[in-house]
Image (cartoon, rainbow, N blue to C red):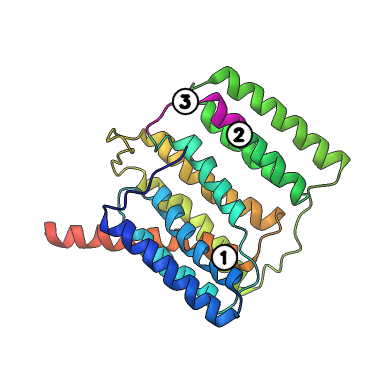
Amino acid sequence: MGRNIDFSYRTNQIIVLFTLLVAAIGWILTGEISSGLYIGGGVFLTWALSRELDSKHQYSAFIAAAFSLLNLLYYENVQLLVIFWILLMMRIVNGITGKELTVFDIYSVLGFTVYLSFNDENSVYLLIFLLAMTFVTKTREKAKVVLIASGIGLAFFIAESFFMNYLSFNNIDYLDPITLFVIATLCLSFILFWFLSKVETKDDRGKSVNRSRLLASQMLYSATVLLLFFFGDMSLNNLIIYISAILGVAIYFIGFTLSSRVRSD
């Protein structure tokens, strides 16, 4: 599930330097080294999320990273582990690494999910894991292992939700402009990803990525953010990162599509 960063590419060099710069600025603004590192890490992971959503267009990730600079204006908490977990979930589904899914991949993510559910006292992570496994079953890859992992995940979900009260609906103000913007962006993202998945994408080994798997991982992303928004303990900083990834991909894709039509005309 790991993806190497090739520092021979200029774009990878730029994002690393940009991350370090933002971390330094965050340190200066907050007065704490750890806060600066978290803000810088958030920028890098925003870029990584966008690259996962839109591997074809590398510059869309930089637009997303620019949006995530809003975290410099207000910093409370960046839940880096949750973002990293989302990346792993998407890679299990989309197969973007070009490597065959292994038993270790599945059970390591299951273990990670169980850890997050107990650490945050929230079983919504297990619900998202089950959704991801549903997508994986359609690929018929490691079917028996996936079925067993799903059974274990379901058992934990039932125990945590019904016996430990680890699942509750957040109290949300639906008239709040931020709430309306977030929900609208996430709902519209499903339409965006439908069109974006039609663009031929190569995996890390140069082979074409299956469109249905790519679309499934993109849908999983939006569904994950929605579920975390309604049921999770999501910080505002993480919300900015999640929405920034979608906005960066959307703006670049729309601009790229329009410019391509203008050139063709």
Q: Residue at x 71, y 69 (%)?
A: 173
Q: Nearer the viewer, residue 139 or 51?
A: 51
Q: Is residue 177 left or right of residue 61?
A: right
Residue 3: which disc? none
Is 71 placed left or right of 49 in the picture?
right
Mark 3 secondary-structure assignment = loop
Identify residue for label 3.
Answer: 139
The percent coordinates of residue 253 (x first, y second) are: 32, 58
The range drawn in magenta is: 98-108
Q: First in sequence, mark 1 or 3: give its number.
A: 1
Residue lying at the far front in this picture: please name it.
33
Q: Residues within 10 Å of mark 3 (few under 14, many from 20)?
A: some
Name the residue that disc number 2 marks. Answer: 108
**Circle 1 crowding by C-alpha within 10 Å: few under 14, some 14–19, many from 20:** many
Magenta highlight on residue 113: no
Whether residue 109 is visible = yes
For the question of whether residue 250 can be seen, the reply is: no
Q: CA distance from mark 1 to mark 2?
A: 24 Å
Amino acid residing under circle 2: Ser
Residue for badge 1: 38
How far apart are labels 1 and 3 at the CA level?
36 Å
The residues tagged by marks 3 and 2 sit, at their Cα atoms, a distance apart of 19 Å
Q: Is residue 47 left or right of residue 198?
A: right
